Amino acid sequence: MAGKPIATVGSMHVCPMCSGLVPHVGGPIAGPGAPNVLINGKPAALMGDMCVCVGPPDVVAQGNPSVLINGVPVVCQGDMTAHGGIVMSGEANILISTSTPNPQVTSPIQEIPFPEIRITDRLGAALRGRSADLRESATNMAQVRSEAENDTLSLTNLQWKHEGIVINKAIVDTTIELTADVSGAENGEIVRLAICERTNEDKEIKSVSAKVENQQIVASWKVAYKLNERNQTNEDEEESSDYIEPKIIFKGCTTNTSSSESNEISIYTWLKTRLKVESTGEILCNTNCVLHHPTGIEENLTSDDNGYVLVEELKLGKYKITI
């Protein structure tokens, strides 16, 4: 298929939508785009970028799935917006082509701010002689809506499991499964999942992939959690006085994946150490010792016949053992 010029921040779109007596007209793509990828000195435009419009803010609702920047499809000339507008310009020296019949992908429908066409908009368009434009806007919006509904990959029943059992906590270094039911994808398609720590912005800590089989996906993750530097202490620094209790979720992050997420799991750690005399190396078997928790709790333990102390489940934090 012939290539289309890639759009950048500043590329123009036209908007046939009318709000009452006011035609939207359109305007430049405002971004933010991809500031780390410049084309002719301008950030590449990405699906989901805002557009200047006389009416409410518009959003580019389509992109080219064959070129991803920061995991998001780039915008090309001809891609449509939430108002039924069309991106009309791009960089003529950078063409994007694809071998697929439909070179566009559409944002998930819940991310597209479709405007409502009210009776006052129809009357205003008629008075201004712009009824045909409003019909074009409605037709384009219906097309975008249809493509969004058809293109959206839906994940449901997202669950953490260990050996087939649903879990709500996991131990560091244990391998667990991420499972979900899938619709809108064929067998063999790859779905990418983001493992995130539950924060205000759900910070991604790991990305894993799974292949769709019988409308389901199963991915594996060897549990790992790196303590924030503010929670790490040196020997001569003041020790942390509390546990660290991260909550972890996973969600789909493949383009056009519906917004759904798993249940939260809590991350725990474990402890295995061998008691010995530092100066002589003597192994201390069947020896009583004390595990000091970050909160000041003292737990009495005893080493085994080989001198090992094992605690299979602990909240994350700074611990020490004394004899």
Image (cartoon, helix red, strand yellow):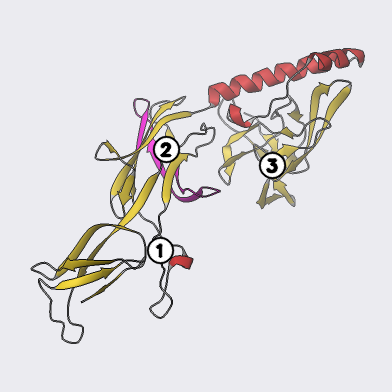
> Which residue is at 33% across, 54% downward?
268
**Residue 215, image quadrant:** top left
Disc 2 is placed on an element classified as loop
Q: Which residue is mark 2?
A: 262
Residue most toward the left? 305
> Which residue is at 12% across, 76% downward?
284
The answer to which of marks 3 and 2 sits earlier in the sequence is 3
Where does the N terminus fall, quadrant-wise?
A: top right
Answer with left or right where residue 239 lies relative to residue 293: right
**Residue 317, image quadrant:** bottom left
Q: Nearer the viewer, mark 3 or mark 2?
A: 2
Q: Residue 161 or 167: which is nearer the viewer?
A: 167
Residue most toward the bottom? 279
Q: Position of residue 105 (x, y in %)?
A: 59, 30
Q: Residue 275 or 111: which is nearer the viewer?
A: 275
Q: Nearer the viewer, mark 1 or mark 3?
A: 1
Disc marking residue 179:
none
* In magenta stretch: residue 35: no
Disc 3 is placed on an element classified as loop
Magenta span: 191-218
Q: Which residue is mark 3?
A: 45
Count how many numbered circles sit on residues in the image.
Answer: 3
Q: Identify which amino acid the numbered label 1 is placed on.
A: Asp
Q: Residues within 10 Å of mark 3 (few under 14, many from 20)?
A: many
> Which residue is at 37% across, 49% downward?
266
The answer to which of marks 1 and 3 sits earlier in the sequence is 3
Q: Which residue is mark 1?
A: 242
Q: Identify which amino acid the numbered label 3 is placed on.
A: Ala
Q: Residue 256 or 39: which is nearer the viewer?
A: 256
